[in-house]
Image (cartoon, grey):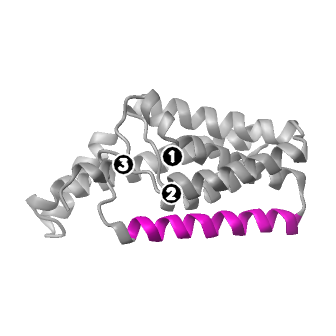
Amino acid sequence: MKNAFVNSSLNYLIRNHACNEKQKNIFRYTLESIYSLVTKTTVVLLLSFFLKTFPITLTCIILYSILRGFAFGIHATKNIYCWCITLFVYIIGPLFIKFISIDMIYIYMIYVLGTLAILLWAPADTPSRPLLDKKKRQTNKIISFIFIILLILSSFYINIPQFYSIIAFILLLESICICPLTYKLFSIPYHNYLHYHK
């Protein structure tokens, strides 16, 4: 299904002069990403609807997607791994948030450690998408930090236990995804921009 969608879309774009041979790989990567995002999100949201965690799951997906859009982080090396991780994170995580109450001291600890992780490691690039522009890296770090601070302040203002847990959950998840140890564990190069000539 994915190949059929990507190839037909790519052929349509080429026929209509929306992309040329040099841009083909970039468009292919983008189309594959869109397909994966839409299919995984649809499956996760459908499952969350039946598990009655839809509001929590949707909030997690939206907030985490925004944070990851600036802080980046590790990617699964195979599509099947990505599916397994996505289903585990967005099905088990919201169920945990819904049914298990977390002591606020642990929430605060995750807030502090997660914010430090953002300051230390964000943005974390990948071999397929190295962040070569130093200014962009700095901008992404600042935006990631501001976004996290706004989320933490919002959680205090909203003052709902589940929302505290959602913010802690996405912070913990992103901290793991940008941690150098995670990259090392999966034998994926870290700070990939350093391997390119300035």
Q: Nearer the viewer, residue 4 or 148?
A: 148
**Of the residues shown, which amino acid type is indicated by label 1?**
Ile
Q: Is residue 153 magenta?
A: yes
Tag 1 near tag 2, CB within 8 Å: yes
Task: Measure the alpha-carbon separation of dots 1 and 2.
Answer: 8 Å
Residue 104 relative to residue 175: left or right: right
Picture quarter with the C terminus: bottom left
**Of the residues shown, which amino acid type is indicated by label 3?**
His
Magenta stretch: helix, strand or loop mostly: helix
Residue 107 relative to residue 7: left or right: right
Identify the residue position indicated by label 2 in the image.
71
Q: Nearer the viewer, mark 1 or mark 3?
A: 3
Looking at the image, tell me whether mark 1 or mark 2 is earlier in sequence order. 2
Identify the residue position indicated by label 1 in the image.
178
Label 1: element kind: helix
Label 2: element kind: helix
Category of crowding for the residue at label 3, using alpha-carbon neighbours closer than 10 angstroms: few (below 14), some (14–19), many (at least 20): some
Task: Measure the alpha-carbon separation of dots 1 and 3.
Answer: 10 Å
Q: Give the image location of residue 84, x and y in percent.
A: 53, 29
Task: Measure the alpha-carbon separation of dots 3 and 2.
Answer: 13 Å
Residue 6 relative to residue 188: left or right: left
Magenta highlight range: 136-158
Q: Residue at x 29, y 61 (%)?
A: 132
**Of the residues shown, which amino acid type is indicated by label 2?**
Ala
Identify the residue position indicated by label 3 in the image.
191
Q: Give the quadrant of residue 97.
A: top right
